[in-house]
Amino acid sequence: MSEISERVARALDDPENWPRDPKEAVALQRRLADRVRVEPLDVDAVRLVAGLDVSYATDNTALSAAAVVMDVRTLEVVESVAISSEPSFPYISGLFGFRESPPVLEALGQLKVTPDVYLCDGFGLAHPRRFGVACHLGVLLDLPVVGSAKSVLFGRHSVPGEERGSWTPMVAGRSEVVPDSFALADQGKEVLGRVLRTRAGVKPVYVSVGHRVDLDGAADLVLRLSPKYRVPEPVRHADKLCGEHRKAVLAAKEGRTD
DNA sequence: GCGACAG
DNA sequence: ATCTTGTCGC
């Protein structure tokens, strides 16, 4: 059994990790948020990154999760895993981790290789209680996790330049576009994440720390993983894989009428 | 009380 | 997230 499998099993098997209603979930987030650690990440030392994503059926009765491990330097897929399951928690903005983590953990448990860093399709610290899904997975596994989201949930920010690589800080506060977020950050406002232009002239992505990384390292990594498309490659591949997997499972089910 | 609200 | 055709632009 790999090192990841053991961590996954510990996380999934502990009933304390899986509240059955939103009220308990919020309370648990507040407790787990204290365990998040921000620390430097040497991106040059990173080799394998696992992109994570989940695809849901329209009727909300089925889902598929995928983990795609890529070599940061060559952007080649080293290993990919997809699993199917059923939703165990409703989608509630702010409680995303409770819905997304179980299937993602299940997929990670089947990995043979050991990624250096994990990349989530969602937020980390840029969250009302500083506990987005990237923090959630990071704390449950105590492994480095980065969050990269496609839209904003929480945080004020200005618009970065149009060229690839330009960015602006996201500071604490209700989601809103402000004239100059660098000025706000200089005023001592808590920096929660970074609005990063991964592709010239295209809507930016929102990067934040999940666990055991820092914002500079997280943004550096996301930019390196997005040489051509807006969404970083490992997440892009995981998105495609879990979508295909879910459809394949559905087709197989209908074919057998059981 | 009202509006906002990752995937 | 998912359901969907065409369409605008590099």
Image: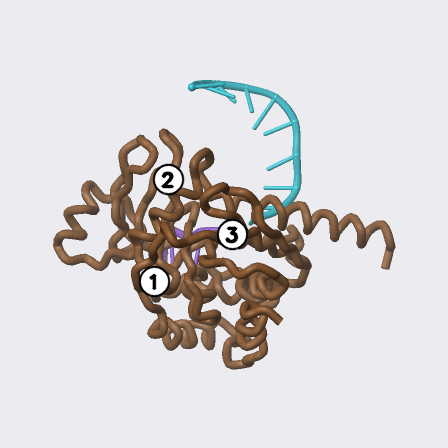
Chain colours: A brown, B purple, C cyan
Residue A61: percent from left, percent from top: 68, 59
Q: Earlier in the sequence, mark 1 or mark 2?
A: 1
Q: Which quarter of the figure has residue A84?
A: bottom right
Q: Nearer the observer, disc 3 or disc 1?
A: 3
Asked whether, in this view, residue A109 is left or right of residue A169, the answer is: right
Q: CA distance from mark 3 to mark 1?
A: 24 Å
Kindly identify which numbered label has been placed on residue A51: 3
Chain letter of disc 3 in the image: A
Amino acid type, callout 2: Pro
Q: Earlier in the sequence, mark 2 or mark 3?
A: 3
Q: Which residue is mark 1?
A: A128
Amino acid type, callout 3: Gly
For the residue labelled by badge 1, is the local secondary structure a helix, a strand or a loop? Answer: loop
Q: Residue at x 34, y 66 (%)?
A: A129
Q: Which residue is mark 2?
A: A204
Residue A75: percent from left, percent from top: 50, 42
Q: Which quarter of the figure has residue A124?
A: bottom left
Q: Residue at x 27, y 51 (%)?
A: A170
